Image: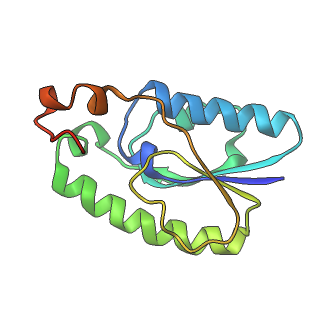
Amino acid sequence: MKILYDYQIFSHQNYGGPSRYYVQLAENLHELKHKPSIVAGFHLNEHLKETKYKNIVTGKKILFSKIINKSNKLKKFISNLNKNIFLKISKDKNPDVMHYTYFDNINDNINCKKIITVYDLIHEIFYDDYKKNKFY
């Protein structure tokens, strides 16, 4: 089965549990003889370079990623660039399953089964603490 992971969490996190989860999940699926692909684009993430199977990752780590991680404008630019890269590559790869790594980009017009993992509801549960409204 061809399983495709998108770029989103990898352009949000240098390190973190969610990005580590996706890398380890892809590695385990690879060992089970599935065909996972992480389309990370231009990313900030350190976990991707630690993977045992370099061929499952498409993308390049951005130099000075710790500095870029502090700039919302740069992160937004990189995310938009990655979205275009992802749409092109995902159509070429023709996956059986698309596994989104974050919930910002789920309208992609790719015809396959889609999965999203929700790994943290803190912002939704404690919306007042994050200055969000109840229906955020």
Q: At x 89% / y 42%, what residue is drawn?
A: 33
Q: At x 77% / y 60%, what residue is drawn?
A: 96
Of the pair 134 and 76, the residue shown nearer to us = 134
Query: How far from the left and from the top, in percent, is residue 95?
Result: 73, 63
Query: How far from the left and from the top, in percent, is residue 59?
Result: 53, 55
In the displayed structure, 121 sits above or below 63; it is above
| Quadrant assignment, res 50 | top right
Query: How far from the left and from the top, in percent, is residue 24?
Result: 65, 29
Of the pair 109 and 62, the residue shown nearer to us = 109
Q: Which colour scheme is used?
A: rainbow
Q: Judge left or right: residue 100 versus residue 129.
A: right
Query: How far from the left and from the top, in percent, is residue 87?
Result: 53, 71
| Quadrant assignment, res 77 | bottom left
Residue at the front extreme of this rendering = 134
Q: Judge left or right: residue 136 versus residue 96.
A: left
* Total numbered labels placed on residues in the image: 0
**In what quadrant of the picture does the C terminus appear?**
top left
Of the pair 107 and 1, the residue shown nearer to us = 107
